[in-house]
Image (spheres, rainbow, N blue to C red):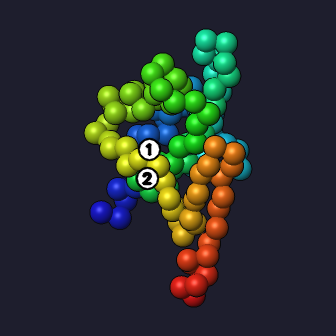
Amino acid sequence: MAQAGRRWQRSLFPWLLDFGFKQCDSDPCVFTMTKTIDGTEQRLTLGCYVDDLFTLYSHDGKGSLYADFTDALTHRWNVKDEGPVSDLLNVDIAVSSADVCLTQEKYIAHL
């Protein structure tokens, strides 16, 4: 179905705004939220591409902003967390405790 992604976005985007996200001015498919929980500022950034969501978060675990969001999301829709991302749109992603490394070596080698 060619319009399935658009229909998903028409349902998802208003829900994200109601949840408290702010939509990015420069890219309407990126949403951010910052909230202080137990005296700690927590950030959550969400990217939406067709029917996939990509999240970056500063804290996880029970009671975190990320946990609250994923609980609400799975309560609203039948979604599945596919775990840590390793690639997205031909960009390889490597995450460590110190940084995030983005490369396109495999994509460039494929060209």
Visible residue check, residue 86: yes
Q: Which residue does the image show at 58% across and 57% down from the upper left? A: 94
Q: Quadrant of the N terminus?
A: bottom left
Residue type highlighted by circle 2: Asp
Helix or strand or loop: what does disc 1 sit on? helix
Residue 86 vertical position relative to residue 72 in the rendered view, above or below: below
Helix or strand or loop: what does disc 2 sit on? strand
**Mark 2 touches mark 1? (CB < 8 Å):** no
Q: Nearer the viewer, residue 10 or 16?
A: 16
Residue 92 placement, left or right of 1: right
Dot label at residue 52: 2
Residue 26 percent across, percent down from the top left:
71, 50
Residue 7 vertical position relative to residue 90 in the rendered view, above or below: above
Of the residues under marks 2 and 1, which one precedes in the sequence? 1
Q: Nearer the viewer, residue 36 or 19?
A: 36
Q: Which residue does the image show at 69% across and 45% down from the upper left? A: 98
Q: Nearer the viewer, mark 2 or mark 1?
A: 2
Dot label at residue 10: 1
Q: Quadrant of the C terminus?
A: bottom right
Visible residue check, residue 18: no
Q: Nearer the viewer, residue 49 or 13?
A: 49
